[in-house]
Amino acid sequence: MQGVNLSWWFLVLLLLWTFAVVADSASVTSSERGGVGRSQRRGGGGGAEKKKRYHRIQHGQCSYTFILPELDGCQAAGSTEQYGSARSRTSVVQRDSPTMDGDWPTQKLQHLENTMENNTQWLQKLESFVQKTLRRDVANIPSHVVHNQTAAMLEIGTNLLTHTAEQTRKLNVVEAKVLNHTSRIEIQLLENSLSTNKLEKELLLQTSEIGRLRDKNSRLENKVQKLESQQRGELEDMRQEKNRLQSVVRTQMSAIESLERQLRVASSNNTALQRQQALLMESVHTLINMVSATGSPPRSQMWRDCADVYKAGHSVSGLYHIYIGNRTEPLQVYCDMETDGGGWTVFQRRFNGSVDFQRSWSEYRMGFGDVLGEHWLGNEALHHLTSQGQYSLRVELRDWEGNSAHSQYDRFTLGSERQQYRLYLRGYSGTAGRQSSLASHGTRFSTRDQDNDNCDHCKCALMLTGGWWFDACGFSNLNGIYYAIGHNIRKLNGIKWHHFRGPSYSLHSTAMMARPYDF
């Protein structure tokens, strides 16, 4: 019974000593956590075996040896009851905290030595207590029982110390992980702070740049306002100038219209004079016929064309009677005795728009208009005229600016009505373009009521008006609509000669005439 009590007392003392060691270890850990942000464990040259502390108690013939494991991070202190000086390295936990102060290892070593001295005193007290207890009761207790109980108690104490050391090591590992995480957070905070400073600097730069741009924008706005005011003034001046020019143009247009009216009056007066001249010539011819013997005129006075008239001694341009082909009735024609040596039989004239040339096929066949004014001699008469021999064709042109030009063809023949009055030309020359504006390969004549052109999907006589050798609506039409000055531009259906003034310029006057090639 006394042995059992002794064992319980010994166990209580051992537990008290264990709690003291744990408390000291906790204080060491608390000191590490408060003084430094990181810890580093000490160890040997790479061995994995922990240091062991031996404590022996001698009692009579029996001795008891306590095997105490050394706590991680603790360094053994010198003692008369402690053996073994070799050190073994424990596992080291690397931390990312800043470097520790130079005095911290010395302080920690001193603290650990104090702790070991306290432990040693506790062990000495325990030893003295055990010796005293054993002196009183050792005689009554078998030695092997005491030895077994003591060994069991020591094993329990050793296990407790080992468990305590392992928990302390785990606690240190957890602490190191916490410190590592805290260090990483601190580094991240530092990086965020640096980034924030950089962003603040960039924000200041952007703010200054925005201010500079705002100043520049204000200057540009001022310039734009000045330019707008200047442009408004210039636009107002231009508007006034435009109004002034419009009034001048209106005045000029009214003057041009007045001149056109005067020109028409003068042209009508000229036409009346020409009629009077024709009447006088007819009266003269009538008187001559009355004086002459009754019957048909002598063969010598039956002129075939104006070339014969010119050869008969008549060199004045005007109306004359000619006998074409086998016709017994004379044909009144206008003879041009001045152009290029004279002798020209005129079969088309236009100069004032007094005659409408939008006629039918039969009208173009028989002819229309006033021989002294604007007229078309007739396709049938022209066919018989060119059938008498080899004739040349001359086309006289004049624009509204007073420029004159002509086109001349050495050979000119017009087919019969059965041939649809085909036109045959050869030997072009003249000043109205480098090439002919008339198709020379047998183009047929077309009118609004008889379409003989070479355009498959159109009617040139309807689109371009008048009667003409259109081919495929071609480069010329001297029988189109007569447009007065100011309205003669961009007129595709006017009086046009492409290689003289282009496809949309309507001319002022034209004349078409024939003369023998050998005149």
Image: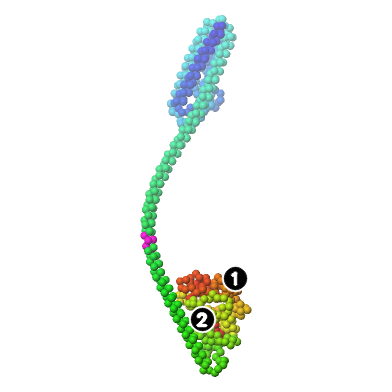
Q: In the rendered image of this protein, does residue 228 appear above or below residue 456?
A: above
Mark number, residue 335: none
Nearer the observer, 328 or 208: 328
Residue 115 screen position, x and y as percent? 47, 19
Q: What element carries label 1?
A: loop
Q: Residue 372 magenta-drawn?
A: no
Q: In which quarter of the image is residue 459?
A: bottom right
Q: What residue lies at 55% left-to-right and 92% top-to-bottom? A: 297
Residue 409 screen position, x and y as percent? 55, 80
Q: What residue lies at 45% left-to-right and 75% top-to-bottom? A: 401
Nearer the observer, 436 or 463: 463
Residue 99 screen position, x and y as percent? 46, 30
The Cα atoms of the two marked residues, 1 and 2, are separated by 33 Å
Q: What residue lies at 41% left-to-right and 72% top-to-bottom? A: 254
Q: In the rendered image of this protein, does residue 336 appear above or below residue 453?
A: below
Q: What residue type is labelled 1?
A: Cys
Q: What stretch is highlighted in magenta?
A: 233-238
Nearer the observer, 129 or 221: 221
Query: Which part of the image, by quadrant, shows the C terminus?
Result: bottom right
Q: What element carries label 2?
A: loop
Q: Can residue 166 be seen in this view?
A: yes
Nearer the observer, 119 or 286: 286
**Residue under numbered circle 1:** 455
Number of dots carrying numbers: 2
Q: Which amino acid does label 2 sit on?
A: Asp
**Residue under numbered circle 2:** 370
